[in-house]
Amino acid sequence: MSILKLRGSALEHAAAPSYAADLLTLTKPRITGFVALAAFVGAALGAPHGTSLWHCAWTGLLVMLCSASASAFNQTLERDLDRLMERTRERPVPTARVSVRDAILFATVLGAVGVAGIALLCNLLAAFLALGTLFTYVAVYTPLKRYSSLNTVIGALPGAAPPLVGYVATAEHVGEWAWALFAILFVWQFPHFLAIAWLFREDYARAGLKMLPAMPGGERVTGRSAFLYSLVLLPVSIAPVVIGIASWTYLSGALVCGAAYAASSAWFALRSNETTARALLIVSLFYLPAVFACVFLDPLVRAQLFG
């Protein structure tokens, strides 16, 4: 029996994540990786002729550090709620694998390096936007999740900011593509978040978080809300063509992507279950990279970038 116990403890020890892996978990790497991509796209579209793509990549990396900081602060502030939810109770801070002090220090360093780097490498306006985005996510959106379902609207603001910050970082002003990408990301988030919230509605209800599917009567209207937002996204996504900064190439791709998103949202609205919610979530994850690709394939954009 003692040998079995020793073997069991050894296996548990071997399976335990390293401290470095726990710190990486605090940054939510899949989300911050997407943030880096979105910021890079914005930076590339705002960059003057002759700007190196490496400069745009560094800009994306610095914006990513700000996002990683926000994620680490978020997990620290919500450690009591994370302990109540199945999908989050094994996170580093709720399990005390990373102390609150270390998590706050780690988040502070990430945010400071990100904001200071943007100020030094790019400009102060972009740095202030990055700092404002970080503040909104941590100090407004995170606590609001406990009190109001409007947290989704507030959370969509910093969620849509990466391409805006990236654009301003290279252009030093807010241009048409910056607003266009901000609007697309802002609206895109609602079906995406609603699908996630529906899938984990029991967890959110257990923790007392005010997510629409977890609220009384909210489960019935979640699908319809997701579908309505997907319809709003269609005209928003073709705005670059209307204002003359993209052509039919982008238009064709954006309409195809938008139709797929609307179709998956409609399926979720008609039959709200785990299968349709996951299908909507998967389509949402493909939507933005596909739209970004359509942007760079457009002749007008290529002429702007490469002359």
Image (cartoon, rainbow, N blue to C red):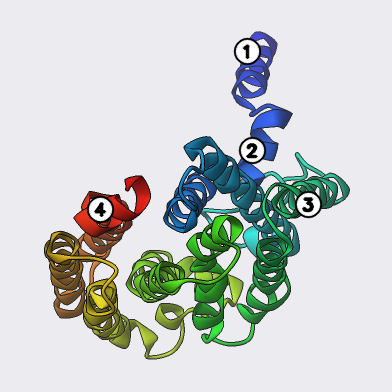
Residue indicated by mark 3: 116
Q: Nearer the viewer, mark 4 or mark 2?
A: 4
Q: Nearer the viewer, mark 1 or mark 3?
A: 3
Picture residue at 62% right of the left edge, 62% below the top: 84
Residue indicated by mark 4: 290
Residue 139: percent from left, percent from top: 73, 74
> Is 235 left, or right, of 169 in this rendering?
left
Nearer the N terminus, badge 3 or badge 4? Answer: 3
Residue indicated by mark 1: 7
- View extreme (top): residue: 3
> In this orientation, does residue 26 appear?
yes
Query: Which corner quadrant of the image does residue 75 belong to?
Result: bottom right
Q: Nearer the viewer, mark 4 or mark 1?
A: 4
CA neighbours of label 1 inside 10 A, class few (<14), some (14 to 19), many (20+): few
Whether residue 100 is situated above or below residue 211 in the rendered picture: above
> Is 10 left, or right, of 242 in this rendering?
right
Whether residue 209 is situated above or below residue 3 in the rendered picture: below
**Mark 4 and mark 2: span between their CA atoms?**
27 Å
> Is 174 left, or right, of 214 in this rendering?
right
**Mark 1 and mark 3: span between their CA atoms?**
48 Å
Q: Secondary structure at mark 2?
A: helix
Nearer the N terminus, badge 1 or badge 2? Answer: 1
Residue 57: percent from left, percent from top: 53, 40
